[in-house]
Structure formats: structure tokens, C-alpha cells
Image (spheres, rainbow, N blue to C red):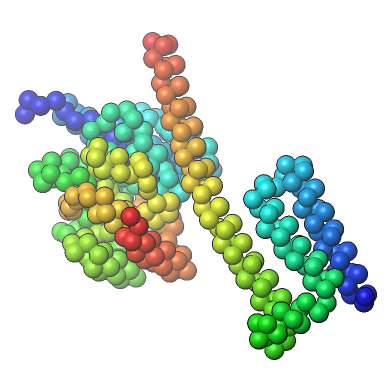
Amino acid sequence: MQRIQFVAIIASVSFLGSVLLQIKKGKLREEYAFVWILSTFALIALSFWRNGLDLLGHLFGVYEPLNLIFTGAIFAILIYLLHLSTTVSRLQLQNRTLAQEVVLLKEKLESNRAANRE
Amino acid sequence: MSQPAKKIAVVIPAYNEEASIASVIEAVNNLRSEQLQLTPVVVNDASRDTTGELISRLKCVPLHLPINLGIGGAVQTGVKFAFNNGFDFAVQIDADGQHPPQFIPNLANELEKNHWDVAIGSRFIDKQGFQSSFARRTGIRFLQWLLECITGRSVTDPTSGMRLMNRKAMKVVYEFYPDEYPEPEAIILYYRRGLTFGEVPVRMNERQGGQSSIQGLRGCYYMLKVTIAIIFTYLRR
């Protein structure tokens, strides 16, 4: 086992640990954590199994196996970002509806109060 | 004319409009009569100037949004208020004094006469009053062409924010209204929801206070955003 493998394993495991800790504290919703846990496991597996990367590279017909990692990672990040964008859009809409509801209720309250005073 | 006067909510979205808002509200209130039951509904879109305090003291329904929603969200707030409170019509006018309220009766009359759901005030039919800059007119012409391709109808002033709607149209806006730069997109929305609409000539003024939000690079962004929004609003079910 080479030194870089140790570094990779330690980094991946501590990343996994911090994700699990966030879930435990209730700061991260499980559905998001799922993606993180899955990708961390993949990283850990590849840290142990060095030949795995060469094998996969060969399987996909990639000239330089390392590029497979980058391609996969970038693709995963893009998908995740898209998912976050849709989440933000949904939150924005919900936020707007809430703000409007608050204003309309406040107005009703004020006008009722004014009517009672008269 | 024995029929009871229609109640019209004049929805005025205001973001940092302390310079002009008072005179706009006053102009609306001065138009009030037996036949014309106008109620200014001012939506303060979390202004950072004194707009909020100002409108609370004036004769209008002040709606203070706790967070800034942008023009579309503010207009929708006013329309929701009008719909919930049984108004027959809601008309949207700008807070910067560009839309003289004197034209509201014309919009209402034309809407009733032609059985429209939405009446849009257009400054390009009679070509009177403030006509905007060359760059803007070019942009407007492109939007006009795009809308005509989709709806098969020509709308001379698709960016006009002066619009009167009946309860049927209010309900459509209640359910969905775009956030930013909603005007051209809303036309497709009316079309897709089966609302009828038409234009009425109005004379607009140059803004009295504040600054246009659409300048320079923002202009390019505006065109891009609106074009994409128009196409996708059309494709949406």
C-alpha cells in the first residue's frame, strides 16, 4: 500500500464521518446525505483497490484511467447542482407565497382592528 | 346607467418610490366618483426608503411585504388582495408616475365593451406621449414579433405594465405570475389560459422619480430572460 492511498483513505473516511455527524445533528436531510455517502463509499473503495481504476478505465476504453474519475466526478457535481437549482427555485416560490400570505393576513388584522375602534 | 358601480382595485407595486408615490395615490383618489369606485392598493416591496411610512399615512390600502419579491411578486400580492376582497377589477399601474390614472376608465370601458378579460394600455397605438428610447423600442419590436409568432395576435406594447383585469384574469394571476419582468411573459400566460385580451391607447409619461431597472447589460439579460420565459411558458401545459 502506498502513502497516497493512506491519505486518500483517511480523507474519504473523515469526510464520511462528517456527513454522518451532520445527519445525526439533523442539519442535513437524509435524501441529500444519500448522494454524499454513496460517492464517499466509491472513493473509499477506489482508495483500497488501486487496480480497480485501471480495470474500469479499460472497461470504458479510457486512455488515461484517472480521467474517468474526473469525468465521473464532474458529471455527478453537475447533476447535483441542477438538483440544488430546482430546490432553490421551489423554495423561492414557497417563500413568496408565505410572504404574500403574511401580508394579506396582516392587512385583514389591521382593518378588523380599525373597524372595531369605530 | 342604473347598474351598480364596479369596484376597481388600483394595484401599485412600489419599491423605493418615495419621490413619486404620493402624487400617484393622490391622482387615483382624485378620480374617485360614484361611478368609479377606485381603491389604491399599494404594495410596498420591502422598500429601503420612506415609501412604507409614506403610504401608511395616505388614503390607500398599504400592503407591506416583509421581504423583497420583485415586481411580479408584488403585483401578484395586490391582485390576491383584490380577488380575496371581492373587487370586480384590478388594474396595475406603475408607482413612478408613468401611467396616468385618467386612462383607467377607458381601459374598463373597452374591456366591458369587447368582453375582454384583460385590457392592456398601449403607448404605441396613437403614438402619443413618452415613446421610450430607440434601443428599447427595438427590443419591444422583437418581443412583439415573438408574441405574434406564438399567439397569432399583434400586441403593440407587450412591456406595458398598465393592465386591467377582470376576476377571471385575476384568478389566473393568483395561481401563477412570473417574478421578474413579468409583462411580456404574462401575455403568453393569458393566451395559454384562454383569456381574451386587447389593447387600449394610453399616453404615458416619462418617469417622475427613480430609475429604470433595465439599463445596459441588464437590458441584454432582460431580453434573454423574457425570450426564454415566453417560449417555456408557451410550452408549459
Across and down, in percent, residue B15 comes to 46, 45
Regarding residue B12, the answer to whether it shows in the image is no
Q: Nearer the viewer, residue B171 or B7?
A: B171
Q: Is residue A15 above or below residue B168?
A: below
Residue at image x 30%, y 44%?
B172
Number of disc labels = 0
On the image, which quarter does residue B81 sit in?
Answer: top left
Hey, which residue is sitting farthest left in the picture?
A: B1
Quarter of the image containing the N terminus of chain B?
top left
Q: Nearer the viewer, residue B162 or B32?
A: B162
Q: Left or right: where does residue A23 sit relative to residue B92?
A: right
Across and down, in percent, residue A40 comes to 76, 62
Q: Nearer the viewer, residue B55 or B155?
A: B155
Q: Is residue A43 above or below residue A98?
A: below
Across and down, in percent, residue B88 comes to 23, 33
Residue at image x 71%, y 79%?
A56
Quarter of the image containing the C terminus of chain B?
bottom left
Residue at image x 29%, y 70%?
B142
Across and down, in percent, residue B116 comes to 16, 46
Q: Left or right: where does residue B76 sit relative to residue B10?
A: right
Residue at image x 44%, y 57%?
B213
Hey, which residue is sitting farthest bottom in the picture?
A: A63
Regarding residue B98, the answer to whether it shows in the image is yes
